[in-house]
Image (cartoon, rainbow, N blue to C red):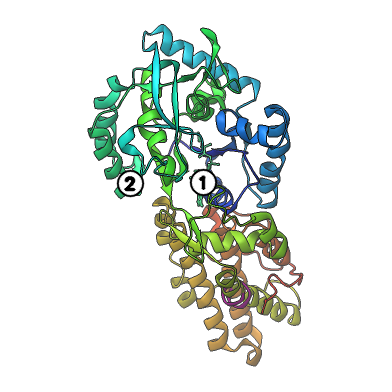
Amino acid sequence: MGNGKFYITTAIDYPSGRPHLGHAYEKVAADCIARWHRLLGEEVFFLTGTDEHGSKIMKKAQEAGKEPEAYVDEMVVFFKQLCDSLNISNDRFIRTTDADHVKVSQDIFKKIYDKGEIYLGNYSGWYCSECETFYTEKDLADGKCPTHGKKAEWVSEESYFFKMSAYTQKVLDFLEKNPESVLPSGKRKEIINRVKEGLNDLSVSRANVPWGITVPINEKHTQYVWMDALLNYVSGIGYPGTNFKKFWPADVHLIGKDILWHHTAIWYSILLAVEIPLPKTVFSHGFINTALGEKMSKSGGTVIDPLEIVNTYSSDVLRYFLLREIPFGQDGNFSEEALKERLNNELANELGNLVNRTIVMIEKSGGKIPDAKTDAGLQKKLNLKKIKELMEKFELHHALAEIFSFAGSCNQFINEKEPWKLDGKEKDAVLYSLADSLRIISILLQPFIPETSKKINQQFGVNQGLIADCEFNKFKAGTKVKKGEILFRKIE
Ligand code: MSP
């Protein structure tokens, strides 16, 4: 962080089916962080997209009776639609089939080959096409992939290998010297222990998977899908051009815990081989389980369609729930019951009511922001420093709780002051305090629930502010307010 610029990425999703709630979760969290940094006044680049090559997609296309190209073109629409419907503010949606990405992938492969760090050999071993990962006999549990529980397949073919073993010490040194390299910190320790066992050379090409980027030195091979997908983080910002120079190294790669190994051991080694600095932080978020406690994934069959939830409730209700319910970095549960509860108690009762009561009271007393100052006691209830620190530490759930705690203080302030019993300057002071506080709450909530923040701003007649505007007494007296639609309807 710093230098006034911030580069954040999500994993790129396999468009091997419709997007699920896990995909939605990662994008919403990354979007929240990206928006927060924009509000800090930084220049942000936020990258997300789809990982379209490899055996998994090839198989899905075959099952659907389609050519892989046609298949991914069809599926990617749903992933873009997911971004739109969740208000994801990504600066680019990269597809690994994009021409610029293909070129960068080949260039980087060639660069490592020219350095003498890619050699031709034979690969014999186990492969899980679900996560596109090679496993040794001892990694497997009963012949099945340790992550997906799917039967691994035996692969024996000619393959190019990347001398990843040569990078064990460098990868280890980086992880040990940089406490922020992998977060949460427990995950860093796990990775360190694994790397200490030593890195194996990595098979980086497939001779029998035609759906992929052609190996630049041998057209009979395609690049191993991770040797293609990971490179999106540099191709997506125009490696090796000026935009890349401006934004690299990435501030955060936000990914799920199942692919942390790929984003540390493998990704670091590739970057070290091409002498590109390593990313500042790889943040590993948890998995969303259904209320039944089952891991939610396409292969597991317990899929919740995020688009359906958005349609039934709204984008902000889902965003709020995901960001508030799941401690960021840990696993969490999704259930519609829990979502309804948060919608009714927190969004409708706490926030919606506060906005509504305030606007109604101001409209009743002339419809304009009065000329007054914000109550000193109420000001003390907002702990902006704490919110900033929590965001810096990626404790999104705590930051959101803290913002809502201030909204709670505003509601309490109304109940205590009973402004309907006041008039003149006393009433003005209460109304100004509430409007000024809501102006600030709306800024702070923008990264979490942007549509709601926009609606609040409209009702109060203000433009989107920055974190720097979260100072009290900045609301211009005389500004006209206008009651809008109710923010959240309760659902029984
Ligand atoms: N294509 C690879 C990533 C390549 S990144 C260079 C991939 N795709 S995926 O579609 O399987 O997963 C995309 C992201 O969603 C990953 O970060 C993964 O951890 C995350 N999730 C998948 N299921 C999830 C949940 N149930 N809960 C939360 N996140 C989950 O892996």
Start and end of the magenta stretch? Answer: 344-350
For the point 48% across and 24% down, which residue is it? 227
Is disc 1 in contact with disc 2, using a CB cutoff of under 8 Å? no
Q: Nearer the viewer, mark 1 or mark 2?
A: 2
Q: Nearer the viewer, residue 464 or 36?
A: 36
Secondary structure mostly seen in magenta is helix
Q: Nearer the viewer, residue 376 or 89?
A: 89
State the residue position of label 2.
Answer: 187
- Residue 135, by quadrant, is top left
Q: Which residue is mark 1?
A: 37
What crowding class fits label 1: few (fewer than 14 Cα within 10 Å), some (14-19), or many (20 or more)?
many
Question: Which residue is most to the bottom?
Answer: 421
- Amino acid carrying label 2: it is Lys
Q: What x and y, as percent, mark residue 185?
A: 31, 48
Q: Is residue 185 left or right of residue 285?
A: left
Q: Quadrant of the C terminus?
A: bottom right
- Residue located 46% across and 77% down the image: 377
User: Residue 214: x percent and y percent?
Assistant: 57, 15
